[in-house]
Image: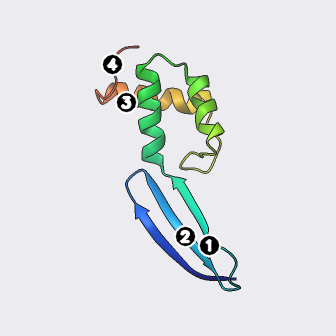
Amino acid sequence: MVKVVIIKERTREQVRLRIVWQDGEPDTLVETRLPPYAWKMIRSMAARGAEPDKIAGELNGLGMLTTQGNPWSKSTVQRIIWSLRKRGELKGGA
């Protein structure tokens, strides 16, 4: 059973926390990345010319999920790239 969960750090892009166990087992450190981290990664990789399927693979490799809780797909990454370009946050492309 969990004794307490301590949030060590919370930023816009990630949460780091420590789980303290009731039975005295060693604490568990957990770090999870949030959707703004994925958008930042998509923006960065797309700016360097990475294809959407490669970007999706990298996000999935990190164990990240979309805001709907699904694995990343090429089409989801393409939609985000389109949105970033429309907002002027990413140059190039159609």
Looking at the picture, tell me which residue is in the foreground, 35 or 11.
Answer: 11
Q: Which mark is residue 18?
A: 2
Q: Which residue is mark 4?
A: 91
Query: Relative to 7, is 12 on the left or the right?
Result: left
SS state under label 3: helix
SS state under label 4: loop
Mark 3 and mark 2 in contact (Cβ < 8 Å)? no
Kind of residue sitting beneath label 4: Lys
Kind of residue sitting beneath label 1: Asp
For the residues carrying marks 3 and 1, which lies nearer the camera in this image? 1
Badge 3 density bin: few <14, some 14–19, many ≥20, Cα 10 Å:
some
Between the C-alphas of marks 4 and 1, the distance is 44 Å
Between the C-alphas of marks 1 and 2, the distance is 6 Å
Snapshot quadrant of residue 66: top right
Between the C-alphas of marks 2 and 4, the distance is 39 Å
Kind of residue sitting beneath label 3: Leu
Looking at the picture, tell me which residue is in the foreground, 58 or 92.
Answer: 58
Q: Residue at x 46, y 70 (%)?
A: 7
Q: Which residue is mark 1?
A: 27
